[in-house]
Every structure is written in structure tokens, then in C-alpha cells.
Amino acid sequence: MSDINLSYFPARLRELRKSHKLTQAQMAARLGIAPASLSYYESGERLPDLRVMDTLYNEFDVSFEYMLGYTQSPLPPDPTVLDFLDLSPAACDNIVEHFNKTHTDNAALNILLESQSFFEYARLLADKAIRQLRKEAPDPNADKNEKLLYTLIEESIETSYSQELSRLEKSMEAEMIEKGASHPAFQHISENVPNQLDDCLELLYKYRIYTKEGRPFPPKDQMKLNKHFKWLRQMDEEFEGEA
């Protein structure tokens, strides 16, 4: 915790307590610490541990970054694909207009407008909007953000991991027919792919957030991501060897 910015944390902790009209004793009870410890934190004489920071987040809806002064928003909204693309309001309206044209029900549009998952947005764009937008030539007068959207749509907005996993699954089909579903390698895939994919997509989502904010991606997360791709290559080699 040596990176804590003491010029912000004590003041924001005091502001947080006062905004909730809590005494030091009441605030300490909410955090599960002694009143004396809270007094030390508010005066900047001691540093809180990660458990206290986690409790602040869960109890008071304030982020670690806000308490340390890295952001002015206590709990910023989860980023969406529109945030990642830095789209103008006009470009956002254009997306909604195209979704209105290409969807026969309101459910998918509601997902587009309300979902907090980048990958749900990406799948919707890739599966629905691409077909419509590819029929129309980009407006030469469109702003740079809208032109960027067309470029990304042409690239199908897919992660390399998803592409490689899809390729691996297709290559398995012939093997499945020839050797049967009881083959040990197929059992290994069925047991491991869902968890591997979910974890990898979560890391890729986190990587996009860090990149957009200009922050270095944590080395431990990069190592995890590298392991996912290594695992995928190993599985690919295993099936090629079985062919």
C-alpha cells in the first residue's frame, strides 16, 4: 500500500463520513475497525489495508481510485463499447438508428442501450449492425469517430482469442466424428473451455479499460493472459498430433 496518495485519502475519508452523517465510532463500526484506527486514517498517520478499501467500496460505493485521488468520480459508470470508441453523440445516434432498422424486436436494442458488457455490445454489432452498415458507403462528411466505427465494423470487432478458439472447435469436428466423444482430449476440452474462455474475456475486457485510461496493464494479469494463449496453442497442437 505504499502507493497511497495521502494528500487525498484522509480528506476524502473525512468527507465520506460527514456526507453520511456518521460519527467516527459509527464509521469505524461500518468498516469493521477500531475508532482509533479510523482516527489515524483520517489524520494520515496510518495507511488502510486492502480489506478496509474493499469495505469502503462495498459499503459506500466509492472506488479505490477515487479515494486515492486518481479520479473525481466516486464510482464511474462501467465503460461500454461506445466509451472505448470515443464516439460523438451523432455517431451514437447513428448506431441506434441502424439497430432500429435491423432488429425486429426491442430486446436486442435494450441490450445495446443498457448492457454494461463490452463483449455483449461487440457481439451485437458484429452480428447485426455489420450486415446493415456494409450495405452503405461511409458518409464522406462523417466525423472521424463515425469513420472509425466503420473501420472497426469492417474488422468484425472480434478478439484473437475468440477467433482462435472458434478455429480450434472447427478442427475438432472431424476428429469427433472419427474418434468419438469419449476421446480423453475432448473430455478435457469440455471441462476446461468454458472457464478458460470466461476468464480470458474478463482479462481482455480489463486490458481494454487500462489501455483506454493510459494505465499500464498489471504484469500478473498479463501473465495470466499469456497462459490462456499458451494453453490454447497447446490444445491446438495436441489435436493436430492426434490427426
Image (spheres, rainbow, N blue to C red):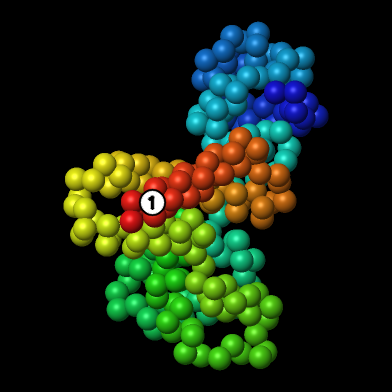
Q: Give left or right: position of 77 versus 195.
A: right
Q: In what element is the residue under mark 1?
A: helix
Q: Which residue is mark 1?
A: 241
Q: Give left or right: position of 189 versus 72.
A: left
Quadrant housing the N terminus = top right
Residue 153 picture location, percent across and down: 53, 75
Asked if one can make out residue 1 in the rendered structure from this viewpoint, the answer is yes
Residue 2 picture location, percent across and down: 75, 23
Q: Give left or right: position of 181 versus 52.
A: left
Quadrant housing the C terminus = bottom left
Q: Which residue: 64% across, 66% down?
A: 86
Q: Which residue: 39% across, 55% down?
A: 240
Question: Quadrant of residue 67 in the image?
Answer: top right
* In the foreground, 173 or 15: 173
* In the foreground, 181 or 57: 181
Asked if one can make out residue 120 in the rendered structure from this viewpoint, the answer is no
The vertical placement of 242 against 111, above or below, is above
Disc 1 residue type (three-letter): Gly
Q: Which residue: 61% across, 42% down?
A: 222
* In the foreground, 177 or 212: 177
